[in-house]
Amino acid sequence: MQYDVIGTIVKGVIDRPLGSAHPDYPDMIYPINYGYVEGVFAPDGEEQDVYVLGADAPLETFEGRVIAIYHRLDDVEDKWIVSLDGSDYTDEEILEAIRFQEKYYTGTLLRNTRNGMI
């Protein structure tokens, strides 16, 4: 797992924009933009997935700062949480924003602190 990515700037593509339906579960509508970082591969062999916070309209691409990682305990994937506007959202704000999809998994939110990872 790459925890050292927290705090870095990443850019990529939004393949499931805000308001769009999940390709396999059409009743699941994305309340935030969801995409991937081009050229960075996750353990599932696909490009690294990200939840993008800080936009109230659908996006096609993004560039922002990774502020947290949602580490799934029952899956091989981690999801990066990206802030477009530099805001450092609270744990509660992040968990509420991603709950629509992460409610199907068990995980923990990882953040940098002055003394390391929490």
Image (cartoon, rainbow, N blue to C red):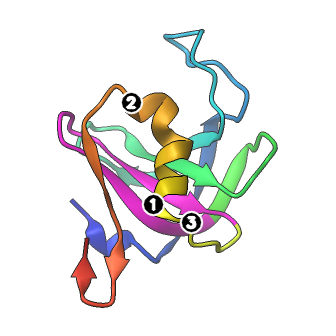
Q: Is residue 73 left or right of residue 4?
A: left
Disc 3 target residue:
89
The stretch in magenta equals 64-84
Q: Secondary structure at mark 1?
A: helix
Is 53 located above or below residue 25 in the figure?
Answer: below
- Label 3 sits on what residue type? Tyr
- Looking at the image, do the residues carrying marks 2 and 3 touch, with CB atoms under 8 Å apart? no
Image quadrant for the N terminus? bottom left
Q: Residue furthest front?
A: 92
- Label 2 sits on what residue type? Lys
Is 33 located above or below residue 90 in the figure?
Answer: above
Q: Position of residue 32 (x, y in %)?
A: 65, 40
- Which mark is on residue 103? 2
Q: Secondary structure at mark 2?
A: loop
- Which mark is on residue 91? 1
Q: Secondary structure at mark 3?
A: loop
- Which mark is on residue 17? none
